[in-house]
């Protein structure tokens, strides 16, 4: 994976505060999307009730879990390499149990137990509540597997622990699953159909986070714009709902307004959006509330109408432009980021040039860019030959990355000279004398520590930048009085 800004620490051991009385030790690693990291917090919460405290020391763990991603082959190969590491430790500690969670578990199912002899249990994204039963199976000497996709499960009744938390920012899951059958994507097969979480439970979790000192929440879903609560059930069954259910339904625009009103001093972000599902009322709601951040991650995947159709992306190039135009009209300083796949089957040089020209039109703030990787079970794998040579994929990917780096610098330069509100999240990686935080546009800002602390909102004058980072100085308003 190539990207301009790397904010997620993938594969890092996660840890929470120890619960008194718990004697067993859990080591859990997460790979892939933010939803996986959020799910790991749910898993840790469930296992905390079963006597497990988390540890960052693999060698001392009684139970090792890896939460996996299947979106690209490279992600799966990374997990298999980690299993080799676990195996080496298990030779020293034979009582250690190893489990695989997440999308890779759902995709491979019992095949995982056959291919990776070290694995004791395989648990899909909708089966985490069954972990206590599955661990009993393992303790009794049997392999354990549960990869049944649910029509209802959202984990809304579980209060997730906050793993490796900075105490300032948190994820809150609002939907699970995806109904958009993009031909390249395994998510509908690994996470099931779209279902939404009760908005009341979402607001309660947000209120609890505020009471515990958190200042920013990211609302998560495979496709947040498809959020639709009408009393429970799959989104696809909404047409069968009663007139009362339809009249009182909460869509995504209403949900983010509820969140903004519930905690007007808390910042809100969301991820991920799908262009075909983002409606004008979402953009209008963002523009209405200052505490909804001016940032949208809006994957497009390709700039070619022909390739978009082959991907089963239910929007055209022109419709995407119209959406971008509406965002920039209503929220002029809104940052926009992208996902882009190059080298999709049958992609021509003309298709590739269409992607570059789309990028020139939008001028994204940053992006996540990939060469096409065939995923078993997807429609593209079944129907389309992976016919673009690797050297062509690499060359086209490099051209996309180079153009994105140019645009990223252009976008960060536009902040120089401005005063922007920054939420301090942590100490800068490069200097223990500087803080690191993000502005509303999701751009990293670093500035001298002075008397500020993590969790403070600080007005910062932007003096310089790189293509990924803004560099500034906090404004001390007391000096002006």
Image: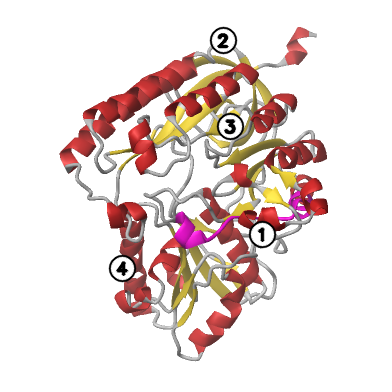
The mark nearer the N terminus, 1 or 3, is: 1
Work out how far the residue at label 1 is from the one at label 4, CA to CA, in angstroms: 29 Å
Characterize the local packing of mark 3: few (<14), some (14-19) or many (20 or more) Cα atoms within 10 angstroms. many
Pointer 2 with pointer 3, Cβ within 8 A: no
Residue 472 sits above or below residue 401 on the image: above
Cα distance, mark 1 to mark 2? Answer: 40 Å
Q: Which residue is mark 3?
A: 437
The secondary element bearing badge 1 is classed as loop
Q: Which mark is residue 417?
A: 2
For the point 43% across and 28% down, which residue is it? 317
**Label for residue 84?**
4
Give the structural element (helix, strand or loop) at label 4.
Answer: helix
Q: Is residue 473 above or below residue 191?
A: above
Alpha-carbon span between mark 4 and mark 2: 50 Å
Q: Is residue 267 left or right of residue 261?
A: left
Q: Secondary structure at mark 3?
A: strand
Residue interval drawn in magenta: 187-205
Q: Position of residue 316 (x, y in %)?
A: 44, 31
Kindly report the distance in space between the C-alpha atoms of the residues bearing marks 1 and 3: 24 Å
Q: Which residue is mark 1?
A: 160
Extreme residue in the bottom direction: 140
Q: Is residue 372 visible?
A: yes
Between disc 1 and disc 2, whose residue precedes? 1
Q: Residue at x 46, y 55 (%)?
A: 187
Q: Position of residue 135 (x, y in %)?
A: 54, 81
For the point 41% across and 65% down, the residue is 107
């Amino acid at each position: 994976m190539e990207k301009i800004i790397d904010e997620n620490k993938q594969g890092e051991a996660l840890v929470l505060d120890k619960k008194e009385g718990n004697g067993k030790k859990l080591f859990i690693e997460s790979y892939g999307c933010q939803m996986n990291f959020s799910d790991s917090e749910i898993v840790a919460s469930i296992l905390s009730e079963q006597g497990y405290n988390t540890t960052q020391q693999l060698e001392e763990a009684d139970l090792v879990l890896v939460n996996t991603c299947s979106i690209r082959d490279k992600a799966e190969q990374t997990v298999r390499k980690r299993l080799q590491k676990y195996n080496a430790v298990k030779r020293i500690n034979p009582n250690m149990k190893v489990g695989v969670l997440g999308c890779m578990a759902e995709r491979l199912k019992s095949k995982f137990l056959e291919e990776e002899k070290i694995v004791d249990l395989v648990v899909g994204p909708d089966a985490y509540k069954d972990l206590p039963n599955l661990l009993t199976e393992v303790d009794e000497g049997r392999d354990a597997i549960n990869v049944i996709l649910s029509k209802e499960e959202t984990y809304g009744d579980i209060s997730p622990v906050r793993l490796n938390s900075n105490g300032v920012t948190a994820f809150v899951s609002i939907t699970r699953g995806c109904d958009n059958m993009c031909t390249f994507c395994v998510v509908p097969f690994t996470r099931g159909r779209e279902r939404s979480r009760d908005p009341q439970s979402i607001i309660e979790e947000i209120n609890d986070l505020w009471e515990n000192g958190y200042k920013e929440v990211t609302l998560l879903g495979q496709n947040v714009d498809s959020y639709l609560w009408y009393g429970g059930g799959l989104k696809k069954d909404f047409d069968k709902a009663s007139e009362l259910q339809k009249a009182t339904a909460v869509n995504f625009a209403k949900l983010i307004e509820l969140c903004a009103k519930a905690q007007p001093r808390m910042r809100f972000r969301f991820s991920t959006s799908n262009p075909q599902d983002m409606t004008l009322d979402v953009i209008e709601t963002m523009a209405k509330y200052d505490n909804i951040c001016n940032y949208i991650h809006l994957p497009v995947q390709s700039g070619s109408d022909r390739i978009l159709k082959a991907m089963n992306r239910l929007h055209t190039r022109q419709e995407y432009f119209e959406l971008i135009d509406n965002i920039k009209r209503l929220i002029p300083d809104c940052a926009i980021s992208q996902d882009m796949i190059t080298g999709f089957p049958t992609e021509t040089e003309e298709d590739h040039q269409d992607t570059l020209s789309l990028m020139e039109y939008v001028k994204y703030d940053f992006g996540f860019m990939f060469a096409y990787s065939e995923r078993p079970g997807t429609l593209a794998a079944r129907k389309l030959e992976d016919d673009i040579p690797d050297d062509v994929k690499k060359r086209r990917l490099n051209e996309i990355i180079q153009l994105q780096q140019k645009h990223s610098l252009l976008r960060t330069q536009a902040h120089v000279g401005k005063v922007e509100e920054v939420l301090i999240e942590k100490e800068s990686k490069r200097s223990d004398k500087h803080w690191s935080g993000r502005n509303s546009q999701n751009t990293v800002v670093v500035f001298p520590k002075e008397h500020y602390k993590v969790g403070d909102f600080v007005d910062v004058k932007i003096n310089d930048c790189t293509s990924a980072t803004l560099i500034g100085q906090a404004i001390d308003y007391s000096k002006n009085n």
